[in-house]
Image (cartoon, rainbow, N blue to C red):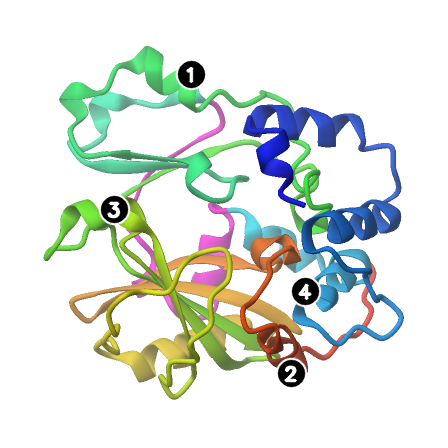
Amino acid sequence: MNYKKIFKSRKTRARILWKLRFVPDRPMIAMQYRIKLGRRLNLKDPQRFTEKLQWYKLYYRDPLMRQCVNKYTVRDYVKQKGLEEILVPLYGHYSRPEEIDLDGLPERFVLKKQHGGGGHDVILCKDKSKLRRETLLSQLAIRLDKVPGGVGGREWAYWDMETGIVAEELLENAQNPEAGVDDYKFFCYDGKAEYLVVDTDRFIGHKRNFYDRDWNNLHVTSDCPACDREIEKPENYERMLEIAEILSRDFPFVRVDLYNISGRIFFGELTFYPWSGYVQFRPDEMDFLLGKDFKLRKRTEV
């Protein structure tokens, strides 16, 4: 079922999920999985990647995950791993939109909600002179108390995250600024990068290719079409693998997102529940392949 065709407004979908927050996590996740993927969720003996991610939400709760999904506090985690050089330069951190000092920011920058995910929570400013403060505050409209993050997909690591906004340098594709920078997303299992997806042309026709760690194109599609051209392996690719594995050693699974601009590597984010586990791969075998190295073990919050 394509529920987005029924409820076209993202805000409407969010309101519905918020009203259903009283439903316990396990039945809610099972219901969402059935609605979105059209099959029954197997939590007793999960084999698929999408099934294991639902199990991960329910039974693996490491407080370190909370630090790592926060776009501000994850910077300390990256520093602790000895990788400060890959952090995107930080211009500012604010607890509420009204604190943003536009005069103190450069002409080009990016603003991100520290508790958000995806393009809905990012504002790219390429010309500050055209930015109206009132519009900015409206776009960033966040509650001043704790935001019930993770409600939609019942993603535990995002629950009750403090609000905040980070201002960073705007990374750009020198060859084609309108396209956006390519995003390299490494699927890592207990510190071993096995697969990656490359998102390209994000702002002019989003495409995505799947590769194994040896840069073999797996010819897989998901919720995004494959690129109509072969994507070149980036400079310093082996260093990117090394970085992804350093940042993923503490977790059974995490996706490590990196950028590579003319050979310089930048950190993007750490994602524990890609697509919230609600994505259909084509061919379907990819769901099992991604799940094969995902070793489940329970952990409760301490």
The alpha-carbon separation of the residues under discs 3 and 4 comes to 28 Å
Confirm whether the magenta stretch covers residue 76: yes
Q: Position of residue 274 (x, y in %)?
A: 57, 58
Confirm whether the magenta stretch covers residue 82: yes
The alpha-carbon separation of the residues under discs 3 and 1 comes to 25 Å
Viewer-side label of 3, 1: 3
Q: Which amino acid, mark 2?
A: Asp
The alpha-carbon separation of the residues under discs 2 and 1 comes to 43 Å
Tell which of 216 and 124 is nearer to you. Answer: 216
Q: Position of residue 56 (x, y in %)?
A: 74, 63
- Residue tagged by mark 4? 50
Q: Using residue 209 as the reference point, say whether residue 182 is left or right of it.
A: left
- Residue tagged by mark 3? 204
The alpha-carbon separation of the residues under discs 4 and 1 comes to 35 Å
Mark 3 or mark 1: name the one nearer the start of the chain. 1
- Residue tagged by mark 2? 293
Which secondary structure, mark 2? loop
Q: Quadrant of residue 161?
A: top right
Q: Are marks 4 and 2 in contact (CB under 8 Å)?
A: no
Can see residue 102? yes
The alpha-carbon separation of the residues under discs 4 and 2 comes to 13 Å
Q: Quadrant where the N terminus lies? A: top right
- Residue tagged by mark 1? 138
Can see residue 61? no
Q: Which amino acid, mark 1?
A: Ser
Which secondary structure, mark 1? helix
Mark 2 or mark 1: name the one nearer the start of the chain. 1
**Vertical placement of residue 174 versus 7, above or below:** below
Residue segment shown in magenta:
71-96
